[in-house]
Amino acid sequence: MILANIACFVETYNFSDKYEVSALNKFKLTAEEMGHALDFITKQDIRSIPKYDAVFIRATTDPLYTAYLVSKTAWELGLRVLDAPQSIQICSNKIHMYSLLERNKVPYIPTVFVAKDEMHHRLVRELFSLLGPILVLKAPYTSFSKYVEKVASETSFRQVAKKFFRRSDVLVVQKFMPTTFDWRVGVLNDEVLYVCKYKMRKGGWKHGAKLRGKHTFAWGKTYSLKREHAPERLKETALRACEAIGNGLYGVDIKEINGEYVVVEVNDNPSVYAGHEDYRDKDIYEKIIAYLVN
Amino acid sequence: MVSDIDFPINAPRMKNDEFLKSSARDFILNINADYRYMKIGYYVSLRAEVLGNKVIPPSSSAIDAYRIPILLLRASIAGIPTAPHLVTDSVNDITSEFNFPVVVFPVISFSHVNFKVAQTKSSLYRIVKSLSMNYRYPVCAQPFSGEIVSFKSVFGESDLKEAWELAEGFYEEFKVPICRLYAQKIENRLCLCGAGPMNIEELDSFDLRLISERIAMLSDDFG
């Protein structure tokens, strides 16, 4: 007898990376071993959502994407859902996310919000003098290292800002803090699930970067360590950050600078690639499925 | 009250940009014509919530009201009449569910409400391809009854007499003070089928007076 029916919402791109395919299969297998059924559903199957007990979203989330429709539909129908619409609203908009980190006094990268109507020469100069000679501009809807650019002059600041202001009336300006890796702490329901180091690409400053002349992204290496071996203050910082957001599944990116931990971002719908995030802590599939059916 | 719209009121008032930099702790009435996701009207509501204020409209309503499948789902749960609909990217699913003509709405809309009516299967293919951005997103299909009416909703009051109840129900559920609603006439009653932002120029003197009155009432209630 099947205990619970779980829908896993995916898009075709979720099957383009063999490590992600392997992770998706592990979710299915784990669910079945635990006595549940897990079906992969796509945008053609939205009307079938009411027949499930829980929905697990693996496609990229954003309030403008189909994944949000799926999450909101499931939530309105009273189903258990990862990621919940509230998490998507917060984490998919960096203005929202950083505002909550600020309110909850979580240490994060020095950040200023700039509204489209206040862009002028004096403000740009003030930002350079406040945050340093190199700034990072982030569109609020950034994900997977996209729509994040560094600028070192007013001209490039204006060019990038103009591009990002097409979709959002407010954008994020941050201090440039280069490191060789970012910590990635996976958190589920206020507990640390896994800990990794996401290395920057050789010669780059982001974990992922678009290859020159190509449409594809290339990623830096991922090193995993057992969660009990990760620094305690790192885990505490990640949990504090998630406490400000909600109690779902999150991937917290953290920089370690001079022994201090500062949050770069809290992401909903964090990547789970077989052999990467699960390399040291193999129970992450079981814990996620258990959360969905609890 | 936070707004860039110019109208006479007696309540304390801030401009959008000024409010985004402030730490005001109060009940916030966000009066903008466009609350779409990532537009300034949305960020005003978001800022108010982050500061711990009660705000009209809530930022989540600003997201949900303009996403047609979510609008229809929440409206139907709230008892507001809605047209039957199907969210899919499959023409065959639409034709097996509804007879022609069919009206198709995009589920991702970066601009104002946009819809197209298909009379035949071949036109439906073209419309679904276009509104789904080449099948990247699903679309929301509804049987087309022959007429879609559009009307202003200002604090739940409409400029179209027969839509008063619908506008009131919409405001009760979503608390979006200013927007344009779309409805189909099905068997002599209006069924909600879309919502979108308004242009400030569409607000006439009657609307501005109504907004001033409602602000005064809400200021008394929360003041």
Image (spheres, coloured by chain):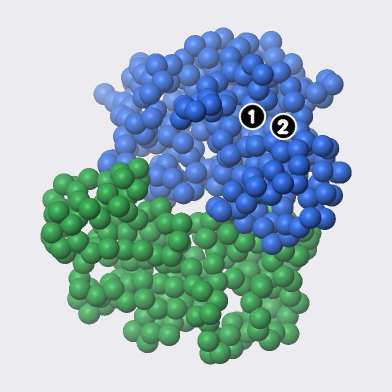
Q: Is residue A192 above or below residue B60?
A: above
Q: Which mark is residue A252?
A: 1
Callout 1: SS: strand
Identify the image quadrant of the N terminus of chain A. top left
Q: Which chain is blue?
A: A
Please report the residue visible at 73 percent of the width from the left and 28 percent of the height from the top.
Answer: A237
Point out residue A185 in the picture as x, y percentages from the top left corner. 63, 23
Location of residue A23 by image quarter: top left
Discs 2 and 1 carry the same chain letter: yes
> In the picture provided, is A84 more to the left or to the right than B30?
left
Please report the residue visible at 58 percent of the width from the left and 21 percent of the height from the top.
Answer: A193
Callout 2: SS: strand
Location of residue A258 by image quarter: top right
Task: Name the one closer to the observer, A185 or B124.
Answer: B124
Specify the amino acid type for callout 2: Val
Q: Earlier in the sequence, mark 2 or mark 1?
A: 1
Please report the residue visible at 48 percent of the width from the left and 40 percent of the height from the top.
Answer: A61
> In the picture provided, is A240 more to the left or to the right than B163?
right
Point out residue A246 in the picture as x, y percentages from the top left corner. 60, 40
Please report the residue visible at 40 percent of the width from the left and 82 percent of the height from the top.
Answer: B164
Marked residue chain, label 1: A
Q: Which mark is residue A263?
A: 2
Numbered marks: total? 2
Contact, CB < 8 Å: mark 2 with mark 1?
yes
Q: Which chain is green?
A: B
